[in-house]
Amino acid sequence: MKEDKQAMDTNSSADHVDEYLQTLGNEDARELRYYSQEQPFNSDELAKVVNEKRLNELLAQSDAFLRGLNDGIKDFENDNKDP
């Protein structure tokens, strides 16, 4: 019986590999296969996995970085305007 189970598992794996290889040349099929593996999360599930405090810290850091970058670009533009 164990051998039958292993044979079934092997066939199953081989079928998946064959199916995957057939989709490699077909962009639409590959994209459909990719998106079919996504699982939607509802807000309760996301709240359990997202560290809201850390997310807010990262957002604040990214805002500060973008402000600094924008200021640097403005300074660079102003420096290049004056001969």
Image: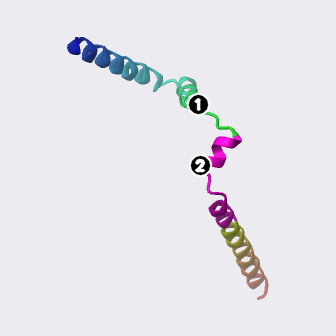
* Amino acid marked by disc 2: Val
Write down the region rendered in magenta.
43-59
Q: Position of residue 22 (x, y in %)?
A: 43, 20
Chief secondary structure of the magenta span? helix
Q: Nearer the viewer, mark 1 or mark 2?
A: 2
**In the image, residue 71 lies in the stretch drawn in magenta:** no
Left or right for 65, reference 9: right
The label on residue 35 is 1
* Amino acid marked by disc 1: Tyr
Q: Position of residue 59 (x, y in %)?
A: 69, 63
Q: Position of residue 42 (x, y in %)?
A: 68, 38
**In the image, residue 47 lies in the stretch drawn in magenta:** yes
SS at mark 2? helix
Query: In the rendered view, would you say 37 is above or below 50?
Result: above
SS at mark 1? helix
**Residue name at image x 76 percent, y 77 percent:** 74
Query: In the rendered view, would you say 58 is above or below 17?
Result: below
User: What quarter of the picture does the C terminus occupy?
Assistant: bottom right
Q: Quadrant of residue 37?
A: top right
Q: Position of residue 3 (x, y in %)?
A: 21, 14
User: What quarter of the picture does the N terminus occupy?
Assistant: top left
Circles 1 and 2: CB atoms closer than 8 Å: no
Along the viewing direction, whichever of 4 and 79 lies nearer the viewer: 4
The earlier-in-sequence mark between 1 and 2 is 1
Residue topped by disc 2: 49
| Whole-number angstrom distance, CA of label 1 to CA of label 2 | 21 Å
**Residue name at image x 27 percent, y 15 percent:** 5
The label on residue 18 is none
Q: Quadrant of residue 82?
A: bottom right
Along the viewing direction, whichever of 65 and 45 lies nearer the viewer: 45
How many residues crowd mark 1 within 10 Å: few (<14), some (14–19), many (20+)?
few
Along the viewing direction, whichever of 58 and 63 lies nearer the viewer: 58
